[in-house]
Amino acid sequence: MKPVVVRGGGDLATGVIIRLVRAGYPVIVLECARPTAIRREAAFCEAVYSGSKEVEGITIRRAETASQALREAGTGPPILLIDETAASLGEIRPDVVVDAIIAKRNLGTDRTMAPLVIALGPGFSAGEDADYVIETMRGHDLGRIIERGPAMPNTGIPGLVGGASRERVIHAPAAGILRNRNRIGDIVEKGEPIACIETEQGETIPVPATLTGVLRGILPDGFNVPVGMKMADIDPRADQVKNCRTVSDKARCIAGSVLELVCGYYNGVVRPERA
């Protein structure tokens, strides 16, 4: 069986990858050279930096070439390849491509990439950019398979977690080098610095916690952040430390819809309409 190619290795993509692997599908993940996932302890894209990453008992390994990825993808665990533009698809020749970048816009995915192309979230329209689009907006339609038309537009408002929305997400107050004072999983108090940013002008700008709770995610120490970039996420539920390292309910829901389409395709039930 040819590997399923998943573009992106963030936390939502990781839920998709885990579901596919556990169902017996070989997976190759295409990632950029500088991933910006916040929930790094639950994101396979961390393998870009460390060479491998384990999430929920599954370990992904980084390959250096498409040919190496193809050789190793059929052995069980997923394989990651740094390939932001998906140039390796000509060599991999997959039956299925899943765009799970969650960039809120299309970064180059189209239906010529594979016989079945699935895309997650806003920025895609089923029947145009992809064969099917999966709804990623929290609410009644989360995980809905869209056969024609777009997903809901991005609102820019983070979903509610423990009753908190905008205030749980922290954006960089200045451009510069991030220096973390806390690690993912730490309990933090509102107002205390969780990190600072060293600017080119020699200033050190503190980054205070916006809530009391668990530091669910933060960019890597030493990351060069532009002003306004999403850099951290706090869960106000202080008893949720273990969840920092596991796939979220949202990711599991979306992953189930992707798996439904992939299984349906290989069983001859799902037949993308192409002109």
Image: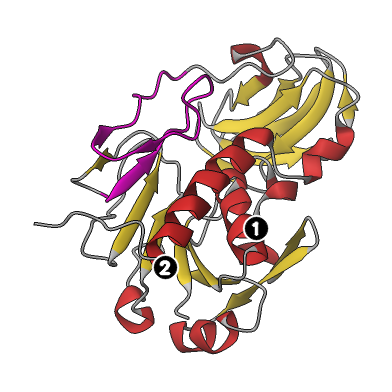
The residue at the point 36 percent across, 71 percent down is: 95
The residue at the point 27 percent across, 54 percent down is: 108
| Earlier-in-chain disc, 1 versus 2 | 1
* Position of the C terminus by quadrant: bottom left
Mark 2 surroundings: few (<14), some (14-19) or many (≥20) residues within 10 A: few
Query: Magenta segment, which residues?
Result: 130-156
Q: Provide the major secondary structure of the magenta segment.
A: loop
Above or below residue 169? Residue 111 is below
Quadrant in the rendering for residue 235: top right
**According to the image, label 2 marks what residue?**
266
Label 1: which secondary element: helix
Above or below residue 111? Residue 177 is above
In the picture, measured across the screen, residue 272 lies left or right of residue 33, that is left
Amino acid type of the residue tagged 2 in the rendering: Tyr
**According to the image, label 1 marks what residue?**
18
Amino acid type of the residue tagged 1 in the rendering: Ile
The residue at the point 36 percent across, 76 percent down is: 88
In the picture, measured across the screen, residue 239 lies left or right of residue 75, that is right
Q: Is residue 21 visible?
A: yes
Q: Are marks 1 and 2 in contact (CB under 8 Å)?
A: no
The image shows residue 188 at horizontal and vertical percentages of: 87, 23
Label 2: which secondary element: helix
The residue at the point 49 percent across, 51 percent down is: 260
Q: Is residue 36 visible?
A: no
